[in-house]
Amino acid sequence: MSTIIGLLRHGQTDWNVDMRLQGVSDIPLNDYGREQANTAAEVLSSSTWEMIVSSPLSRALETANIVASKLGFENVDVLPELIERSFGVAEGLSYDDWKTLYQDGQNVDQAETIAQLDVRANALLELLALKFEGQRVLTVSHGALIRRLIHIISNGEFPREGERFGNASMTTIEHDGDDWKILNYDPKPLS
């Protein structure tokens, strides 16, 4: 029996608009982000999900709660493993400043390295396959984490160079009992 996981990215925040690194900083949705969550819920209303789980950060949790309310779920479970990559002292910097100050994007005090994120993403995939075996679960999470999950599952084929997961975009993955595969890859916001 297959396990289906929807990877929904949270709605927009003001820091998304400003192209700032958010990481684990708890930046709330803006009004447009709430509209995106409502639009996502309308698109997802024709889908069959058994539960919704979210990162503990407010931008993801509010997105999940908006979607849950529209889909008739009474609650959203929080799964701490869905939290965004930590960018350490670089959080709050613009992407351009981050790339200028930390050209490899790695040597940032208190930041989670790509290697550490890969370990966490692989552990998350294992957790999802075991904890939600045979279920259809909608998760609400964050761009950097979703990128790594998709990178791992696709053996580096996706995301393509320079491709970003838009706010309120959703990619769906499936575990067949042995391996993960991508069912639907779409980095554009649901509309």
Image: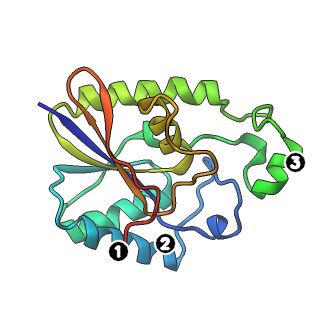
Residue at figure coordinates x 81%, y 56% from the top left: 96
Q: Are the residues at dot 1 and dot 2 in contact (C-beta closer than 8 Å)? A: no
Q: Are the residues at dot 3 and dot 1 in contact (C-beta closer than 8 Å)? A: no
Kind of residue at disc 1 = Thr
- Residue 137's tag is none
Q: Which residue is mark 1?
A: 39
Q: Which residue is mark 2?
A: 33
Q: Classify mark 3: residues with Cα within 10 Å, few (<14), some (14-19) or many (20+).
A: few
Seen in the picture, residue 33 relative to 79 is either above or below; the reply is below
Judged from the image, the secondary structure of the residue bearing numbered disc 1 is: helix
Seen in the picture, residue 160 relative to 107 is either above or below; the reply is below
Judged from the image, the secondary structure of the residue bearing numbered disc 3 is: helix
Q: Which residue is mark 3?
A: 100
Q: Quadrant location of the N terminus?
A: top left
Q: Position of residue 164 (x, y in %)?
A: 57, 54
Kind of residue at disc 3 = Thr
Seen in the picture, residue 18 relative to 161 is either above or below; the reply is below
Q: Earlier in the sequence, mark 3 or mark 1?
A: 1
For this rendering, which residue is in front, 114 or 67?
A: 114
1 vs 2, front mark: 1
Q: Is residue 172 left or right of residue 168?
A: left
- Is residue 141 visible from the viewing direction of this image? yes
- Is residue 93 visible from the viewing direction of this image? no
Q: Is residue 82 left or right of residue 163?
A: left
For this rendering, which residue is in front, 17 or 81?
A: 17
Name the image quarter holding residue 123. Answer: top left
Q: Earlier in the sequence, mark 2 or mark 3?
A: 2
Q: Classify mark 2: residues with Cα within 10 Å, few (<14), some (14-19) or many (20+).
A: many
Mark-to-mark CA distance, 3 and 1 = 36 Å
Kind of residue at disc 2 = Gly
Q: Position of residue 120 (x, y in %)?
A: 50, 27
2 vs 3, front mark: 3
